[in-house]
Amino acid sequence: DAGVIQSPRHEVTEMGQEVTLRCKPISGHDYLFWYRQTMMRGLELLIYFNNNVPIDDSGMPEDRFSAKMPNASFSTLKIQPSEPRDSAVYFCASSFRGEQFFGPGTRLTVL
Amino acid sequence: GDSVTQMEGPVTLSEEAFLTINCTYTATGYPSLFWYVQYPGEGLQLLLKATKADDKGSNKGFEATYRKETTSFHLEKGSVQVSDSAVYFCALILIQGAQKLVFGQGTRLTINP
């Protein structure tokens, strides 16, 4: 298996623009997680899904953030409109029975 | 609530030194415990795990023992290498609960040649 796949790996955009991050989990995994990592706040769980259903979105910072999982092999995290304070590395992870496997991350820079 | 507390970093050691990174936890149920490692520019990778009390997880020369009596899961390595420089995260997951990891804040380790 190729592992968790994220795209793009790097994204540079201007404030106010819409940003969409994509994730393909490992086949057969039933949980999918979105994290954000910054120097100031460390690693934060934003939202997670079980069998494509959102279970806990309490970590989503505000209404500008939304996440979807239309099927078992694809998820998106959208920021609209983006702001400079959204600059971070965003990780997707998937799991089956506990152990989480992380993707390489998307480094987002909002100018 | 459930939480993980790690040794404050950063930690700087010389090559071949002995490493300990402390980790303690608080959990309402029976957790499984993990150490993840993040190398520069990469995502987190599972380093080792232990699923019940007195289990010892080991990988790449690293070890950690699940100590229920002290609620600890300290990471150790007898002789570190420059290539061990990374950020290390201790984490727990409740066996009977939600399948989300609770992470410590991470400890940055730098090994000098």
Image (cartoon, rainbow, N blue to C red):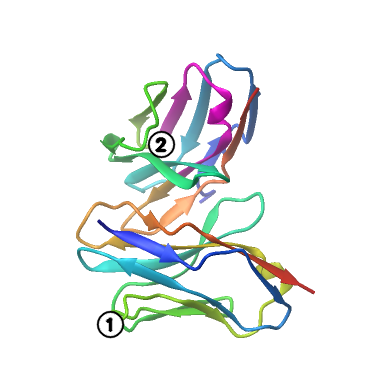
Image quarter hosting the C terminus of chain B: bottom right
Please rate how many residues cluster around mark 2, counting C-alpha atoms within 10 Å: few if below 14, some from 14 to 19, many from 20.
Answer: some
Dividing the picture into quadrants, the one containing residue A12 is: top right
How many numbered badges does the structure rendering display?
2
Q: Amino acid at mark 1?
A: Glu
Farthest residue toward the right? B113
Residue B51 image offset from top left, x and y in percent: 32, 72
Which residue does the numbered mark 1 point to in the structure image? B69
Q: Residues within 10 Å of mark 1 (few under 14, many from 20)?
A: few
Query: Where residue B66 appears, x then y in whole percent?
Result: 36, 78
Compared to residue B17, the image places residue B99 above or below, namely above
Report the residue at 50% width, 68% height from top. B7
Q: Quadrant of the N terminus of chain B?
A: bottom left
Among the 4 quarters of the image, the one containing residue A52: top left
Taking the magenta stretch, the answer to whether it contains residue A77 is: yes
Considering only vertical position in the picture, is A57 above or below B5?
Answer: above
Q: Which mark is residue A73?
A: 2
**Protein chain holding label 1:** B
Which image quadrant is residue A74 in?
A: top left
Q: CA distance from mark 1 to mark 2?
A: 41 Å
Question: Does the magenta segment cover residue B100?
Answer: no
| Residues in magenta, as a range | A73-92
Q: Position of residue A26 (x, y in %)?
A: 44, 47
Q: Residue at x 42, y 21 (%)?
A: A64
| SS for callout 2 | loop
Report the side of B13 relative to B88 (left or right): right
